[in-house]
Amino acid sequence: MASHQQFLLTAQLQHLTALDQQIATLDAEVERRLAPLAETQALIESHPGIGKRTAETVLSEIGATVAPFRTPEALAKWVGLAPGNHESAGKRLSGRTIPGNRSLRAALVEAGQAAGRTKATYVGAQYRRMARTKGAKRAAVIVAHTLVVDLWYMLHRQQPYVDLGVEYFDQRDHERVQRQAVKRLEALGYQVTLKPAS
């Protein structure tokens, strides 16, 4: 390695060290300012997919209360995660979300992707269900909308997240799931007779 390369590498490493120190200073300041809201932050972090950074973003953008937002839909609209309603002559043209709070929206979509990777949770099941038909990116936005609604109820009631479970959709659509399974087996050439388990 030549001397000029050593000089440039040293300068880059010093720059990275300075950035790390600045990040640590900012993290300490954020923690100091959010210390009075530690209980609310823990409440927000009880939701699958939401970590420390996302909880800090939520608290910094909307605060510890959702009183300014009368309904979960109002909060979703403010964040920019409410589905669009572009319709003409009775035909739905687009479901694109509306503009809103960019930093909070980005944090919640990222949290939606993280929640989608969870295995035994309702939001994980919702993500996988939506990703099959709408794609991974749209599924993340749909789960982010669910996160906003859940956050509104959690902060409004001051209660931690209660998961509906990974089997929620199958239990809700029991007859439809049963019908689809029978239809699929019949298409494979089987004769199906359903008998409830004892």
Image: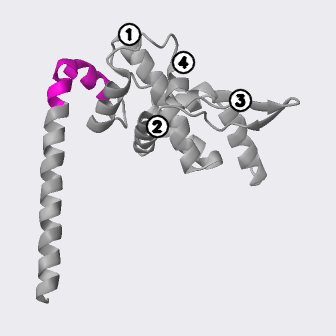
**Residue 57 visible here:** yes
Q: Where residue 1 sits in the image (x, y, percent)?
A: 14, 89
Q: Quadrant of the rendered structure where residue 103 is?
A: top left
Q: Which residues are magenta?
A: 31-45
Q: CA distance from mark 3 to mark 1?
A: 29 Å
Q: Are marks 1 and 4 in contact (CB under 8 Å)?
A: no
Q: State the residue position of label 3.
A: 85
In the image, is 143 to the left or to the right of 28? right
Residue located 50% across and 38% down the image: 125
Identified by mark 1, the residue type is: Arg
* Mark nearer the viewer, 1 or 4: 4
Q: Are marks 2 and 4 in contact (CB under 8 Å)?
A: no
Q: State the residue position of label 2.
A: 102
**Label 2: few (<14), some (14–19) or many (≥20) C-alpha neighbours in 10 Å:** few
Check residue 157 in the rendering and tell me which mark sits there, or answer none: 1
- Label 1 residue SS: helix
Q: CA distance from mark 2 to mark 4?
A: 16 Å
Q: Where residue 144 sits in the image (x, y, percent)?
A: 49, 35
Check residue 74 in the rendering and tell me which mark sits there, or answer none: 4
**Label 1: few (<14), some (14–19) or many (≥20) C-alpha neighbours in 10 Å:** few
N-term mark: 3 or 1: 3
Q: Where residue 92 sits in the image (x, y, percent)?
A: 79, 34
Q: CA distance from mark 1 to mark 2?
A: 26 Å
Identified by mark 3, the residue type is: Asn
